[in-house]
Image (cartoon, rainbow, N blue to C red):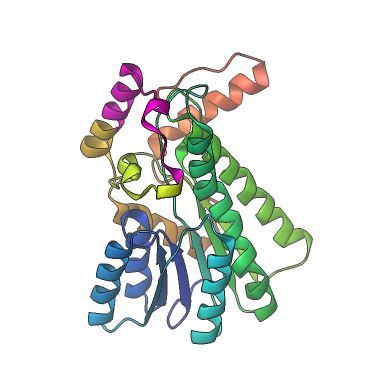
Amino acid sequence: MKDFKNKVAVITGGGSGIGLALAEQAADLGMHLVLADIDAGALDAVTKTFEAQGVRVLSQVIDVRNEAQLMALADAVYAEFGAAHLLFNNAGVGSVGKIWESTATDWDWVMGVNVNGVVNGIRAFVPRMIAGGEEGHVINTASIAGLVTGHGMAIYRVSKHAVVVLSEVLSHEFALYGHENMSASVLCPAWTKTQITTSERIRPDDMQNAPEEIKIGAMEIGHLKKMQSLIENTGKTAEEVAAATFDAIREKKFYIITHEDFIPAIAIRGKDILAGNNPRDLGI
């Protein structure tokens, strides 16, 4: 996609972080915005900011785990704009904890947002985008954690690997079934200055653990603090990630790896698989 003016960008998790930066890029290119977020306060604030700039915005408070809410959002988008051209399935959350000590609720919440949220976005919008016949592009936000493995944030890592595979299959199916108007990308950023390490602030009431269920040890806390330090001291800005994403959309580039210094780690993992080696913790 080369021409963005007056086209429609749908962005989940659009109230902050990478989602907001994507919205800013889209607005600068003359696009209309559809912003969805679970954080009503953040969403209201950014919507007012864009509207004050003369940007046409449709915003809804959405929990992407809820398919009906995304279907209703799609209804509203097509009633308002008649089309969607860029679909950013971007909403995501993280959690800490060992695999065997994370609760069923932890798994349901993170997988529900990070994986089912992407599936729900695809199911709500892609059939209409295909039927409309206009050029469309789906961008699913994964992470560098979807391409390499290590310790810590186990559920997050599992969910992001799922998003990478889901996106690859989506790209294959667009080609296989002759949907030449559609293309896909998977966004795999590393350390980025967002609020991903404070996801608990938006954890819904129905996904809260009982106090006695929470088992976060010193090692998990240490890993979280290390991540926060790396993000603060070496992380890219969300705006840099968004700019790289739009460059990839223009080029129909599938894998969007925004931090090239992590590419050797991806290669090491691939070589270990091919050589039959045990997995290495690459510290990512």
Q: Is residue 74 left or right of residue 49?
A: right
**The C terminus, quarter of image:** top left
Residue 78's quadrant in the figure? bottom right
Q: Is residue 214 left or right of residue 112?
A: left
What kind of secondary structure does the magenta stretch mostly adopt? helix
Residue 92, horizontal then vertical, whole percent? 44, 49
Asked if residue 264 is among those painted magenta in the image, a careful observer would answer no
Residue 143, horizontal then vertical, whole percent? 46, 42
Q: Which residues are magenta?
A: 207-227
Q: Is residue 221 left or right of residue 34?
A: left
Residue 179's quadrant in the figure? bottom right
Q: Which residue is pictured at 56% across the width and 47% down the height?
A: 115
> Closest to the observer: 147 or 196?
196
> Closest to the observer: 131 or 60?
60
Residue 110, horizontal then vertical, whole percent? 49, 42
All told, the count of numbered labels is 0
Residue 283, horizontal then vertical, whole percent? 40, 22
Q: Which residue is pictured at 59% across the width and 14% down the height?
A: 278
Asked if residue 223 is among those painted magenta in the image, a careful observer would answer yes
**Against 121, is 168 above or below?**
above
**Against 24, is 234 above or below?**
above
> Closest to the observer: 19 or 175?
19
Q: Which residue is pictured at 34% across the width and 17% down the height?
A: 219
Q: Is residue 53 visible?
A: no
Q: Is residue 43 visible?
A: yes
Q: Which residue is pictured at 22% across the width and 81% down the height?
A: 52
